[in-house]
Each structure stands twice: as C-alpha cells, then as structure tokens.
Image: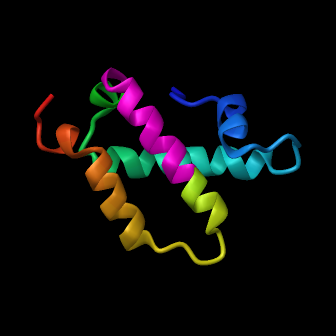
Amino acid sequence: MWVVTLQELKAYLRIDFDDEDALLLSLLDTAKKLVMDVGRMSEEKFAGNEETVRMAMLYTVGYLYENRNGADFEKLTLTLRSLLFAQREGVI
C-alpha cells in the first residue's frame, strides 16, 4: 500500500523527468519503513493516519533524496519523532 504515489512525490520534489523513478520508489519504501518504525505503527495504524503519514513520508523521501551522499539519520529520526509524536504516544 502506498500512501504517497510516485507522481505526488515527483511533484513535491519538483522532478519532471523519469530517470530516477527507481530510486524514488526505493526511497518511498525506505520512508514507509522508517515512518512505521519511528511512529511505532502497525500496517493498520499506518493506514489509519493517512495525512500525518503522508507528510512524514514526503519529508523523509525529500530529506533522503537531497542528502543521499551524507544523510544525518539521527537528525531525520528526531524530526520524524516530532512529526509522529501523537501516533508514538497513543494520543490519537
């Protein structure tokens, strides 16, 4: 299940060519795993928080795409924790 489509991601990143579609799809898969892990989400909870998950995934892929030669995963994880706080702590 994809919360973010390739076309939506390319629009978000302002990419208008197809050369890196395979990379973007790989980053989407990585983003989903990171969001689920950091947000402590099952597949069901992931699907039930679509808007928050969408923003977290777009941010994650954007960060990983722009910093593919030296991503700071500690910084990324801290940002995701902030974005996903309510899901992590069971507030919603």
On screen, residue 88 versus residue 83, left or right, reads: left
Which residues are drawn in magenta? 47-61
Query: 51 and 2: which one is in front?
Result: 51
Residue 2 x/y as whole percent = 54, 29
Q: Residue furthest bottom?
A: 70
On screen, residue 35 versus residue 85, left or right, reads: right
Residue 62 x/y as whole percent = 59, 52
Query: 11 and 70: which one is in front?
Result: 11
Is residue 74 placed above or below 25 in the rendered structure?
below
Instruction: Specify how the rendered protein is coloured.
Output: rainbow
Is residue 89 placed above or below 76 in the rendered structure?
above
Magenta region includes residue 43: no
On screen, residue 7 versus residue 33, left or right, reads: right
Magenta region includes residue 60: yes
Instruction: Give the quarter of the figure containing the C terminus.
Output: top left
On screen, residue 37 versus residue 15, left or right, reads: left
Is residue 82 placed above or below 84 in the rendered structure?
below
Question: What is the tally of numbered marks visible in this picture?
Answer: 0
Residue shown at the point (58%, 44%) measured from the top left: 28
Residue 74 x/y as whole percent = 36, 72
Residue shown at the point (43%, 43%) measured from the top left: 56
Residue shown at the point (18%, 39%) measured from the top left: 86
Magenta-drawn stretch, dominant element (helix, strand or loop): helix
Residue 37 x/y as whole percent = 31, 50
Rendered image quadrant of residue 87: top left
